[in-house]
Amino acid sequence: MHGAVLALSFGVSSALAAVYQNTENIVGPGFYNSFNFEAIPDPTTGRVNYVDQATATSANLTFASGDKFVLRADDTTVLDPSSAGRDSVRLQSKSAYSTHVAVFDIAHKPQGTWPAGETDILEGVNDQGTDQSTLHTAPGCTMPDSRPETGTPVSSDCDGTTPSNTGCGPAFNANGGGWYAMERTSDFIYVWFWARGDSSVPSDVAAGGSTVDTQFWGTPSAAFPNTSCDIGAFVAHNIIIHLTFCGAWAGDASVYASSGCPSTCYDFVNNNPSAFSDAFFEFNAINVYT
Ligand SMILES: *[C@@H]1O[C@H](CO)[C@@H](O)[C@H](O)[C@H]1NC(C)=O
Ligand SMILES: *[C@@H]1O[C@H](CO)[C@@H](O)[C@H](O)[C@H]1NC(C)=O
């Protein structure tokens, strides 16, 4: 019994011990250098019209100052039902990442309405009050029910092709800003969240410094271990930041109704621009470490 406990803790610490060096510090106008605007049809079939950089900046849908980067959707236009959707922004990082740590220092995340705001590590629908860290994969990838994480798993099936595409992440409370961090290795993907003002935020996370050491970060909010899924075989991924409305998940009639939202999702988006005034991201920084 005692021996088994020791063996487990050796296994965990050898998997966690890792110091990473800062390779990208993305702040303010730097977002325009590190990301491409993707004016493409929404892959999640949301009620959005992703615009290019010139359109976004002239409409102030993206805004950069010295140390802020803001990304929002149009919050003034009542939409014709036959239009392409609410003007919004989808950014994709120019770089792709395999083994790495990314720390997202977020001053404001979309809230107060019901948008599906998501990054690769942060998703929420319909003002449900919690966020999810989610892994969306091809069929056949599942997660064990018991994982070293503080969040509560909503599903163990990561198959992004299921009808509701909820993915396999846990929900955790994340109202207001804070730090989201993701560590990806060939053995696991871990996600942490610390709220602004949380005294347990590690100093290397809060400082956005030149190195981070994830072994001191504690139990992650979400853990995706390499058990049935060969995470080492996943392709390098890009960071995607976007705001979409009524996509395959948020717009699903049962998900939408259970969130207490009025009328249909499309009607609501078309007719209530001011409901999207708080649907914006404000970033202090994204730091990438390899
Ligand atoms: C653009 O958006 C930023 C961030 O929300 C805001 O501070 C600024 O006043 C806006 N500019 C205009 C011209 O509306
Ligand atoms: C990850 O899991 C897969 C399948 O379970 C296995 O083939 C692979 O060797 C594992 N990789 C590592 C790095 O443990």
Image: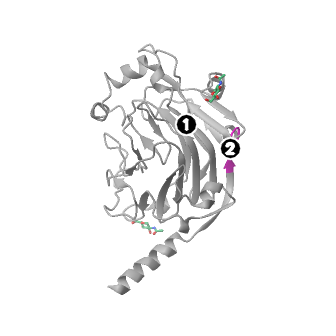
Using residue 13 as the reference point, say whether residue 67 is left or right of it: right
Residue ID for mark 1:
281
Q: Which segment did they paint magenta? A: 25-30
CB of mark 2 within 8 Å of CB of mark 1? Answer: no
Q: Amino acid at mark 1?
A: Phe
Q: Nearer the viewer, residue 91 or 68?
A: 68
Query: Is residue 123 highlighted in magenta?
Result: no
User: What residue is at 58 percent from the left and 54 percent from the top?
Assistant: 102
For the image shown, how many numbered marks are present on the structure? 2
The answer to whether residue 85 is visible is: no
Q: In which quadrant of the rendered view does residue 141 lie?
A: bottom left
Up/down of 111 relative to 24, above or below: above
Say few, some or many: other residues with alpha carbon within 10 Å of mark 1 (under 14 / 14 to 19 / 20 or more).
many
Using residue 172 as the reference point, say whether residue 15 is left or right of it: right
**Within 8 Å: ligand 1 and the Cβ of disc 1?**
no
User: What residue is at 48 percent from the left and 48 percent from the top?
Assistant: 121
Can you tell which mark lies on residue 42?
Answer: none
User: What residue is at 42 percent from the left and 60 percent from the top?
Assistant: 223
Residue ID for mark 2:
27
Quadrant observed for ligand 1 in the rendered image = top right
Tell me the element at label 1: strand
Up/down of 238 relative to 203, above or below: above
Image coordinates of residue 272 in percent, x first then y, are 43, 19
Q: Amino acid at mark 2?
A: Val
User: What residue is at 37 percent from the left and 45 percent from the top?
Assistant: 160
Say few, some or many: other residues with alpha carbon within 10 Å of mark 2 (under 14 / 14 to 19 / 20 or more).
many
Image coordinates of residue 92 in percent, x first then y, are 58, 40
The quarter of the rendered structure image containing the N terminus is: bottom left
The quarter of the rendered structure image containing the C terminus is: bottom right
Disc 2 to disc 1, C-alpha distance: 14 Å
Image coordinates of residue 5 in percent, x first then y, are 37, 81
**Within 8 Å: ligand 1 and the Cβ of disc 2?**
no
